[in-house]
Amino acid sequence: MSKIISIGLALPPYRHKQDDILRFMQLVYAMNSNDNRKLRYLYHHSGIDHRYSVIPDYSREVNDWEFYPQTENLEPFPSLEHRISLFNKTAGPLSVTAIQECVNGLIRGNEITHLITISCTGMSAPGLDLQVMELMDLPKNIYRTSVNFMGCYAAIHGLKIADAICRTEKKAKVMIVCTELCTLHFQKEPTIDSIASSLLFGDGAGAVLVAGDDYPKKGLILDQFYSEVITKGKKDMAWELSSSGFLMTLSGFVPELLEEDFNPLVTRALEKAGIDRGEISHWCIHPGGRRILDAIHRSLSFTNGDLQYSYETLKEVGNLSSATILFVLKKIMNAGLTGGQRVFGAAFGPGLTMETFVANAE
């Protein structure tokens, strides 16, 4: 078996108020007064106060923009190459910051035996895994793998890989780092999908150290994983490449799908784990958006407070794709877990894929 030993988090330097991002979007979208009013309503009811970005422009005046052209129509609009170039420049150092916080006082960097890098917002070869190796001077023979383009549930997929490694290699110390720079992929056309993604997503990184269950420090034992794909939602959540960046599809039907299907999913996941719902003390749910959290709240018939840490994460940083659930889980761990308490985690992404885990506090 394996367990989560620690989690480290990192955010880029530019912290944008949601109201400042709203003003940027209103300027760029050039909407009429009625549509501007609708957009303002969406932002003020998003459940988000701030988001972070590697781009400073979202809370600056036009004359101070650095990433986007200082033109009325944003032309020439940043190309995919321009966006990936900034990803390659900033993702590595941000990842290392999260990893260093994760291992601080526990192990040295050269004791990491396996490295799993996760991202759906930037890809290249050599990629993020080799950048992290070089920046941290990790062993050249380190086992490494990359999980790319799986979306918001990818951190749980990474935990599944780490768990499998630790079950076969008792001395393994697996480092997973999820690094997402979602704000690189802003699109200027005011489509429903562009508005949804510019409303919700931010940048950040989360790192998690997983080791065998005989590791001397107490942690969170990974007990069970379960996943399903809701094929009827295949077209409602997607992530595709284009010449001007990555394009997101996030339809308004997703919360309805989750409200209908999430409770049965939880039932089946708990049946596989052989436990009752009443044994779950903490719920670590990916905050895909306020409507999504509200839908899950209704689906599971929660009372106030059951999704406290998910709502808090959404408020403080927005949706960071794969890294977000690690922000929620760290809040839960920092709040204090007593031995025997169980955590149920879930995240969702393209497919529509739902990944879950059950973990037990030592």
Image (tube, helix red, strand yellow):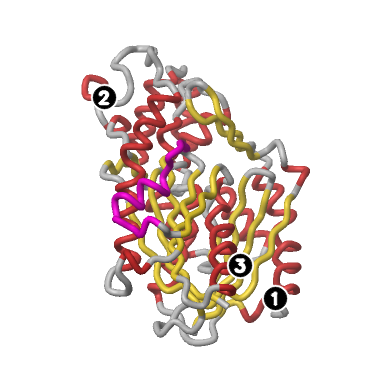
Quick one: SS at disc 3?
strand
Q: Would residue 243 be counted in the magenta stretch? A: no
- Rendered-image quadrant of the N terminus: bottom right
**Residue marked by disc 2:** 65
Looking at the picture, which amino acid does disc 3 mark? Phe
Q: Marks 1/3: CA distance?
A: 9 Å
Q: What segment is highlighted magenta in the picture?
A: 123-140
**Residue marked by disc 3:** 357
Which mark is in front, 1 or 2?
1
In the image, which disc is placed on residue 307?
none
Q: Is residue 291 visible?
A: yes
**Going by the picture, which residue comes out furthest to the bottom?**
339
Q: Is residue 136 above or below residue 196?
A: below
1 or 2: tag closer to the N-terminus? 2
Q: As rendered, which of 215 and 17 lies closer to the eye? A: 215
Which mark is in front, 3 or 2?
3
Where residue 179 appears, as percent x and y from the top left, is 42, 48
3 or 2: tag closer to the N-terminus? 2
Looking at the picture, which amino acid does disc 2 mark? Trp
In the image, which disc is placed on residue 273?
1
